[in-house]
Each structure stands twice: as C-alpha cells, then as structure tokens.
Image (spheres, helix red, strand yellow):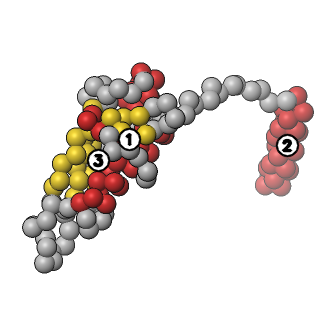
Amino acid sequence: MRRSSNVLPISNHVTIPLTQIELTAVRAQSAGGQSVNKNSSAIHLRFDIHASSLPAAYKERLMRLSDQRITRDGMVILKAQEHRTQERNRTAALERLQQLVRSVAVVPKKRVATKPTAGARQRRLDTKSRRGRIKALRRGAEE
C-alpha cells in the first residue's frame, strides 16, 4: 500500500488523515512460544466515523453496514495480528480500514422493478396446465 506518511488514501478525492485514526500496539493472541507475552506486535485500530472528515454520504453508508467491526455509536474497531512485526500489522490494519471505507464509496444502483413479458406469462400458465393434466391422470388411475 503506497501512501504518504500523514494520510490514508480512499479515492482520488477522499483521504483520511492519520491523526483521525488511533493505533495502539497490544500483545497478540497466539499459542505459547519464546516471545509470547513479551512483544506487543498486534495493532488495535480505532476510527470514529462521526468525528472523521469523510463525506456525509460515506458516513451514512458506513453506519448502515451490518458489520460487526462497527459499533452502534460509529466506532470502527480492527485488530491486526496476523504478521510477526508491528509495522506489518499496522499496514494490514490500515489496509483493512481502507477496504472497508472503499466498499461504501461506490453508490449502489437503484433497483428498477420489472414485469414478466406476455410470452413468459403464457409459458408459465402452459407449464402449470400441463403439470395439472399429468397429476389429473395419476388421480384417475387410483380409483
């Protein structure tokens, strides 16, 4: 991920200043080993949607997402601990925040209701009639 040192790019016109993102180093959860409980290599990222400089449309769509990483009061909480180094986990956390915000950058298309064509309606009714005749023939054989 290429970025300047003080902003997280979302699109050509939208960026998030890194001052609005809180990054904290915490101990990673893992199986025991020589460095367990000694190195704080995991990164805990917190980002307040409402207090951010994102456009209102982005904020609204982020809040409407049913994503467990977003709290009811608009806080995005991510934990990156898949890498061994703090710097790689920091980069991974920022990339995941970037992906989340980019996912709401695209305006969803308005759905246009459509009706089945006259031919499709006729084919459906023909199939139902044919099916009904087959079942009627079965009933006649029982008696």
Q: Quadrant of residue 90?
A: bottom left
Residue drawn 22% across the image and 49% down it: 44
Q: Earlier in the sequence, mark 1 or mark 2?
A: 1
Q: Which mark is residue 43?
A: none
Residue drawn 27% across the image and 34% down it: 20
Q: Earlier in the sequence, mark 3 or mark 1?
A: 1
Q: Quadrant of residue 55?
A: top left
Q: Say if mark 3 contacts mark 1, CB within 8 Å.
A: no
Label 1 vs label 2, nearer the camera: 1
For the residues labelled 3 and 1, the Cα–Cα distance comes to 15 Å
Q: Secondary structure at mark 3?
A: strand
The amino acid sitting under disc 2 is Thr
Residue that badge 2 annotates: 127
For the residues labelled 3 and 2, the Cα–Cα distance comes to 53 Å
Residue that badge 1 annotates: 8
Of residue 67 and residue 85, the one placed in the foreground of this image is 85
Residue that badge 3 annotates: 78
Of residue 4 and residue 12, the one placed in the foreground of this image is 4
Residue drawn 13% across the image and 78% down it: 34
Image position of 31 (left or right of 121) = left
